[in-house]
Amino acid sequence: MINVYTDGASSGNPGVSGAGVYIKANGKIYEYSFPLKEMSNHEAEFHAVLKALEICQENFPDAILSFRSDSKLVVDAIEKDFTKNKTYLPLLEKIRGDSSKFPYFFIKWIPDKSNYADKLARKAIQMQ
């Protein structure tokens, strides 16, 4: 099982944003920071999940994925497979498609202080 922590951050809301991805796999740690364009914090959270799925597809294509995020909005949207928000809907649909390529995909909410990806998302903003 691959443990994946994702986080999105924005400097302003909307503002310059970043995504952080922290992966624990096969006894190793992988850390990624992705600068994003100007968007809301919630959009950045969705993009962080998408970036993590891309990384997993490239590096762990047949793995069981256990995602963790401190965004209740994102976790709830993915678990319920539903959002009314027209901005988030295409992102949710892409997550649905990308996650379906794996044998199992789980996501659960964690508190901010437990999210290893937080500093990586902030770093991505500073990279811009």
Image: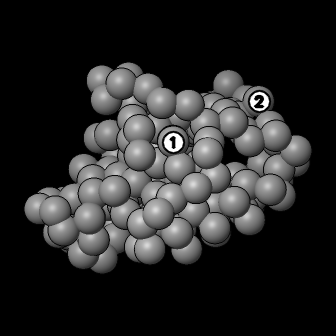
Q: Is residue 124 visible?
A: no
Question: For mark 2, what is the residue?
Answer: 1
Front residue of 29 and 20:
20
9 sits to left or right of 108: left
**Which of label 2 and label 1 is nearer to you?**
1
**Secondary element at tag 2:** loop
Q: Quadrant of residue 16?
A: bottom left
How is the rendered protein coloured? one colour
Q: Is residue 6 left or right of residue 57?
A: left
The x, y position of residue 4, in whole percent, is 58, 38
Mark 2 crowdedness (10 Å alpha carbons): few <14, some 14-19, many ≥20? some
Residue 88 located left or right of residue 44? right
How many dots with numbers?
2
Give whichever of discs 2 and 1 has the lower sequence position.
2
Residue 33 falls in image quadrant: bottom left
Residue 23, position as x, y percentages in the image: 57, 39
Q: Where, quadrant-wise, is the C terminus in this rendering?
A: bottom left
Residue at image mark 1: 76
Q: Residue at x 48, y 30 (%)?
A: 109
Rate crowding at label 1 as few (under 14), some (14 to 19) or many (20 or more) other CA atoms within 10 Å. some
What kind of element bears circle 1? Answer: helix
| Image quadrant occupied by the N terminus | top right
* Residue at (41, 46) in percent of width and height: 73
Percent from the top left, x then y, of residue 11?
A: 14, 60
Q: Position of residue 54 (x, y in %)?
A: 65, 62
